[in-house]
Image (tube, rainbow, N blue to C red):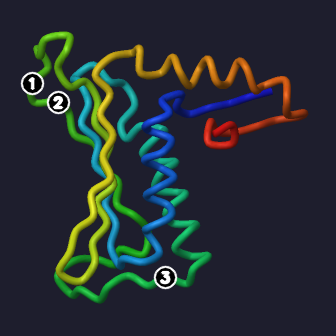
Amino acid sequence: IFIAPNFSIGAVLMMKLSTEVAPYLPDVEIIELHHNNKLDAPSGTAIMTADKIEAARKAAGAKTAPDKTHESLDAPRCLCRRDPYPQRPPAGLRRTSASLIWGYGELLTIRHDSMDRKSFMPGVVLAVKKVSSRPGLTFGLENYL
């Protein structure tokens, strides 16, 4: 059995890279930009990214930078924004997910853009080819990369 919140290889790599660097920088924010008809906000991908980042930070004993201007950021913030340009042409940006990871005086942005549903097909093909190689339940395309 295989379950994947996202079949985009680029989105899965964005989550993986975000998880790997988050313990080294003190603040994290996840931003999504979607078309106006997106029903789930924040998306499962954003929630999973936040959960993975939070787990990686806790495992590493990472602490959030002290900042008295806003509440504690021990857990990643997850923002979802509706696309301000819903009538973009088909080749236009349809979905953006980005992890913004702040250090002291620096910002690392890990961004994934999906312009077409075709972006999910390589991940679907990969999953179909690999699903029989693992017994039981596999959750997440990253396990097949």
Q: How many marks?
A: 3
Residue that badge 2 annotates: 83
Please give left or right for residue 62 compared with residue 38 in the image: right
Q: Nearer the viewer, residue 67 or 114?
A: 114
The residue wearing badge 1 is 85
Q: How far separated are the C-alphas under marks 1 and 3?
A: 38 Å
Q: Secondary structure at mark 3?
A: loop
| Mark 2: few/some/many CA within 10 Å (<14, 14-19, 20+) | some
User: How far separated are the C-alphas under marks 3 and 2?
Assistant: 33 Å
Question: Is 108 on the left-hand or right-hand side of 123?
Answer: left
Picture coordinates of residue 96 (x, y %)?
28, 36
Q: Is residue 52 above or below residue 142?
A: below
- Using the image, tell me which numbered label, if any, was put on residue 62: 3
Label 1: element kind: loop
Question: Residue 106's x, y, as percent?
Answer: 20, 75
CA–CA distance between discs 1 and 2? 5 Å
The answer to whether marks 1 and 2 mark residues whose Cβ atoms lie closer than 8 Å is yes
Residue 73: quadrant of the picture = bottom left
Going from the N terminus, do you reach mark 3 or mark 2 first?
Answer: 3
Q: Is residue 70 above or below residue 86?
A: below
In the image, residue 25 sits, relative to residue 76, either above or below, namely: below
Q: Quadrant of the C terminus?
A: top right
Furthest residue to the top? 90
Percent position (x, y) of residue 95? 29, 30
Q: Position of residue 78 (x, y in %)?
A: 35, 53
Query: What residue appears at the point 13 percent right and 11 percent down from the top-left corner?
Result: 89
Disc 3 crowd rating (10 Å Cα; few below 14, some 14-19, many 20+) is some
